[in-house]
Image (tube, rainbow, N blue to C red):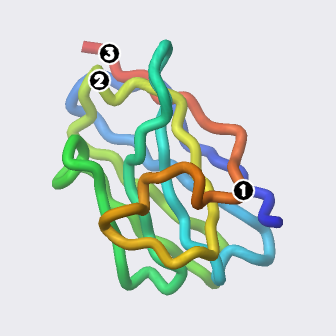
Amino acid sequence: QVALVESGGGSVQAGGSLRLSCAAPGNLDSSNIGWFRQAPGKGHQGVGFISAGGGRTYYADSVKGRFTLFRDNAKNTVTLQMNSLKPEDTAMYYCAATRSYLDSSNWALLIFYNDWGQGTQVTVSS
C-alpha cells in the first residue's frame, strides 16, 4: 500500500498556473501515477497519467497542451504543472497509484488504482 499526499492547490485567476505535487515517502518509484479531479456534483475525471519510469504520459483532451506531468523518483514525487488555467479546471485534485500496466485506452479508469491521496483543492476564478 502506498500513502499518497497531494499539495500545491490554491486559488488562481484564469490564465494563471499552479503546480501540484504527489508525494509518497519511500516507495513511489515502482508505481504508475494517475491524477484525477472531481468538480462539485460531478464524478471523477482522469486528468493525466505517468508511468513508473516516467517514459509514458497520457492526458485528458481537456488539458492537453496546458498540463504537464513529470516525476522525480529520487525524491518520491510526481508533479502536475498546470498552466493557462480555466474556471472549468476548478475541482478537487487527487493522485492515485497503481502497479497495473495501463495504456492510452484505460489509464483513466478508477478501478485500476489501489491507493489514493486525500486531494488538494484548485479554484480558478474568471
Looking at marks 3 and 2 on the same chain, the residue that comes earlier in the sequence is marked by 2
Q: Which mark is residue 61?
A: none
Along the polypeptide, which appears first: circle 2 or circle 1? 2
Q: Residues within 10 Å of mark 3 (few under 14, many from 20)?
A: some
Q: CA distance from mark 2 to mark 1?
A: 26 Å
| Mark nearer the N terminus (1 vs 3) | 1
What kind of element bears circle 2? helix
Q: Which residue is mark 2?
A: 88
Horizontal side of residue 7 vs 26, given as left or right: left
Q: Residues within 10 Å of mark 1 (few under 14, many from 20)?
A: some
Quadrant (top left, top right, bottom left, bottom right) of the C terminus = top left
Which residue is tagged 1? 115
- The structure residue drawn at horizontal position 63% and vertical position 38%, both measured from the top left corner, is 119
Return the residue nearer the eye: 69 or 44: 44
Mark 3 residue element: strand
Position of 111 with respect to 16 (left or right) is right
Q: Residue at x 44, y 70 (%)?
A: 50
